[in-house]
Image (spheres, grey):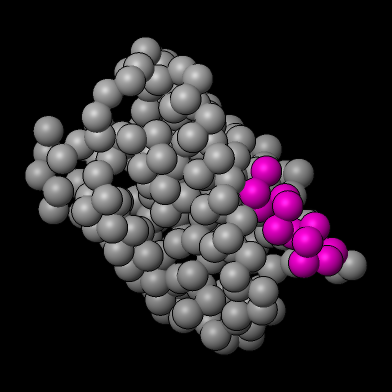
Amino acid sequence: MYSLSRRALVEFIGTLALIFIGAGSIVGIALAHGLTIAVMASAFGHISGGHLNPAVTFGAFFARKISPGDAAVYWISQLAGGVTGAALLTLVFDPATRQAVNLGTPGLGAGISVPQGLVFEIVATFFLVLVVCATAIDERGAFTVISGLPIGFVVTFDILAGGPVSGASMNPARSFGPALVGGHWAHHWIYWLGPLAGGALAGILYSSLYLRRESPPA
């Protein structure tokens, strides 16, 4: 078991990479996010679990696979990584380019209502965290065999389906970093409530139906 500080560091680095690559992509957004998650979850899964997302950590908490204290440290690391990744983008892209895409901040599509965007974020994150539970959190899962590929694939198909709806964030750190650095806060609460609700539902469902009963980490 790695120390909490070492696990927090890779959560920071992995989330930083997600925002820097994913939010920095203008073309091929779904593939960029999916590949980054697949690579970083594969690289750091054996250290921290490769959460890289407060909603995943929230799901793991409800699945009784992470303690409240560790979850809080993960959240801080992920949000800090998101902000740092977004800040680095300001050194790469000129102001006009950043403004044109709101620094990659997720937002509702044209004609999409707040309830529609919220529902999509809940459902998309539910799929994501359920797959994380089945492949990475469950010790009987396939993580050691196929690593982070299924998680990256879920991110990819969620964005392909929901990019025009809500931006398909599924990740409060993914939304918070660009919003804070770029100052784009429209409907920001959706990108916390939706992913956290979806993550909690997935964690509770998978834990109650499939995980062996055991106490959470102290």
- Would you identify the image quadrant in which residue 83 lies? bottom left
Q: Is residue 79 left or right of residue 204?
A: left
| Residue at (50, 61) in percent of width and height | 172
| Residue at (47, 36) in percent of width and height | 203
Query: Does 116 appear in magenta?
Result: yes
* Whole-percent x, y for residue 24 in the image: 54, 64
Quick one: 214 or 173, which is closer to the camera?
214
| Residue at (47, 79) in percent of width and height | 180
Quick one: 18 or 192, which is closer to the camera?
192
Q: Tag count in the figure?
A: 0
Q: Is residue 27 visible?
A: no
* Whole-percent x, y for residue 66 in the image: 28, 40
Q: Main secondary structure of the magenta part?
A: helix
Q: Is residue 96 visible?
A: yes
Q: Is residue 116 left or right of residue 213?
A: right
* Whole-percent x, y for residue 84 in the image: 35, 70
| Residue at (50, 20) in percent of width and height | 209
Query: Does 70 appear in magenta?
Result: no
Quadrant in which the C terminus is drawn: top left
Is residue 31 placed above or below 13 in the rendered structure? above
Q: Is residue 178 left or right of residue 17?
A: right
Residue range (magenta)? 112-123
* Whole-percent x, y for residue 2 in the image: 12, 39
Is residue 153 placed above or below 145 in the rendered structure? below
Q: Is residue 56 left or right of residue 118?
A: left
Quick one: 119 or 26, which is closer to the camera?
119
Quadrant in which the N terminus is drawn: top left
